[in-house]
Amino acid sequence: MIELYTAGTPNGWKVSMTLEEMQIPYEVNLVNLSKGEQRLPEFLKISPNGRIPAIIDTDTGISVFESGAIMVYLAEKSGQLMPSDLAGKYDVMQWLMFQMSGIGPMQGQAVTFVRYFPENIPQAIDRYCNESRRLYEVLDNHLADRDYIAGEYSIADIANYSWVRSYYWARVNIDGLDHLRAWMDRMVAKPGILRGCEVPQGAKNSKDLKQGGASITTT
């Protein structure tokens, strides 16, 4: 059993989508970010940086923080969504790192300056929205001759989709990115992806939420 500590953010959805797609049983523990629960000592024992998501694998006693590391752990544990050959594995890994070092930080900053920063700073908004758009164009070009980012469906797709699906929230323009849009349609058609997007919002009692147990709506 996987104990998942999460909140409703793109990085949190990366892991809940992965768990749902792999059909690994898990329990959800909501970390209330607005109440500062990510800074509680008991959570910092699991995630020293005070960030969600984090997991504890009760079968092995292993705990993992950082969303990308969790996804790799789950892929290796389950033998799913990660190629077994070295070239295929590192094709997936490089696109996972592309999301973690590029799309995540840039789009995250775009959301901060567009939605939450107390002052309107057009230069910052343009900088981060334009860079997010550029990274989307990299994906769009790469997807011109393939259905999924690393050829076969993998955790690289889940990681990038969890952020790209919220392009509107960051006010990133996706006009003309037809290959990206087609890939997004393929991703949203997967039931596990939809279920993962509803974690933890669909859980009234997080301890009762196991694999496949969320109430599903499309967001």
Image (spheres, helix red, strand yellow):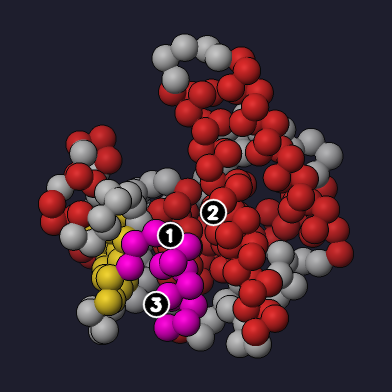
For residue 101, the mark is none
User: According to the image, label 1 marks what residue?
Assistant: 67
- Mark 1 neighbour density, 10 Å: few (under 14) some (14–19) many (20 or more): many
- Point out the tag, 1 or 3, that comes first from the N-terminus: 3
Between residue 96 and residue 196, name the one nearer to us: 96
Amino acid, disc 3:
Ile
Amino acid, disc 2:
Met
Residue in the picture at 57% in, 77% down = 81
User: According to the image, label 3 marks what residue?
Assistant: 24
Q: Residue furthest top?
A: 119
Q: Quadrant of residue 5?
A: bottom left
Residue in the picture at 66% in, 38% down = 132
Q: How many marks?
A: 3
Magenta span includes 65 = yes
- Mark 2 neighbour density, 10 Å: few (under 14) some (14–19) many (20 or more): some
Q: Residue furthest left?
A: 41
Mark 1 and 2 residues: CB-CB less than 8 Å, in contact?
A: yes
Amino acid, disc 1:
Ser
**Quarter of the N terminus within the rendering:** bottom left
| Residue 54 percent location from the top left of the image | 32, 61
What range is drawn magenta here?
Answer: 64-77
Of helix, strand and loop, which one carries label 1? helix
Between residue 53 and residue 197, name the one nearer to us: 53
Q: Quadrant of residue 211?
A: bottom left
- Mark 3 neighbour density, 10 Å: few (under 14) some (14–19) many (20 or more): some
Q: CA distance from mark 1 to mark 2?
A: 9 Å
Magenta span includes 126 = no
| Residue 87 percent location from the top left of the image | 70, 81
Looking at the image, residue 166 sits to the left or right of residue 207; the answer is right
